[in-house]
Amino acid sequence: MDISSADIKKLRDTTGAGMMDCKKALAETKGDFEAAIDFLRKKGLALAASKSGRVAAEGAVAVHVEGTKGALIELNSETDFVARNLDFQALVKEIATIACKEQCDFDTLKSSTDMKVTELVATIKENMQLRRSSVLSVSKGVVASYIHNAYAPDLGKIGVLVALESSAATDALYALGKKIAMHIAAVKPKALTVERLPADIVAREKAIFADQARESGRPEEIIQKMIDGRMRKFYEESVLLEQVFVLDGKLTVKEYIAAEAKQLATDIVMKDYAYFVLGEGIEKETVDFAAEVMAQIK
């Protein structure tokens, strides 16, 4: 029997099951939509739909690095307890490995791993969402990584990737990259360079500083110098290469990289970084358990 892609999509949207599972269900039930839903429910694959509305702000971030390329992903679950589950951890690592090997964008990664997530939802019975991913690579050099608050190797609550392009020895680059990654986890820069700062952030800061400066009542030329001075300080606090390197305390990150390059007698260029904090920006539900119990009694 010929099963249309529209029918498969409809069943998937209804049940939350994977595409191949939906296709199989429709084939087994000769295209009977309701029977296909029952088929998936019996297999435990339709449970994902009832879980999908729940807030998933726990889980884990994971890194996978292979020489000149690396990937960072975040897979969310409802509870921290699930993040300790070995099957969950294995899936997070598997998705990070796929992202690194295939160097794919988020939409492609999500589509290719959606069935794996859905199947684990059916097993563990918690909502899970692949939230985001980032892939970095260099033509020569390394992509180094760091995990903070680790549950297991390459998996935890904060993940960082650092891409260093250089012909220097790999071991030396990895050591430098990990130091920079630890700095990023501690200081949380907003961008690699001043030029990469989002325009809306720069505009908002300038507007605030301008209002503050004009309240002083000083001449416009002095006010402009005050704004410029405060913006320089903002860049020093917010831009990675302009920040004071926390593991040194004197040199900026840019200066520290230059000093390392001089010592290794070669150029080192920091191409990019990626930084995920688990659940950052997700509004978590506050549950009043007493009220919930009383509501059920009534």
Image (cartoon, rainbow, N blue to C red):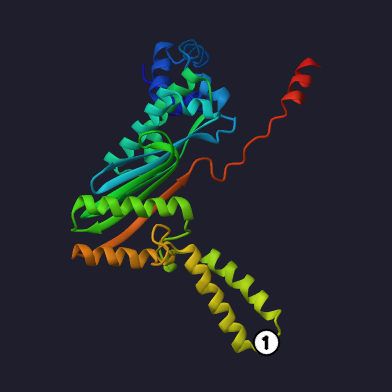
Frontmost residue, 243 versus 125:
243
- The residue identified by callout 1 is 218
Residue 41 coordinates in the image, percent (x, y): 50, 13
Q: Secondary structure at mark 1?
A: loop
Left or right: residue 143 versus residue 156 is left
In the rendered image, the vertical position of residue 79 relative to residue 242, given as above or below: above
Q: Quadrant of the N terminus?
A: top left
Measured along the vertical axis of the image, is residue 22 above or below residue 104? above
> Residue at (23%, 53%) from the top-left corner?
172
Residue 129 appears in view: yes
Label 1 amino acid? Arg
Q: In the picture, which quadrant includes the C terminus? A: top right
Residue sitting nearer the eye, 29 or 164: 164
Q: As rendered, which of 12 and 205 lies closer to the eye?
A: 205
Decide: is 167 above or below 109.
below
Q: Position of residue 155 (x, y in %)?
A: 40, 36
Q: Quadrant of residue 223?
A: bottom right
**Residue drawn 45% across the image and 25% down it:** 118
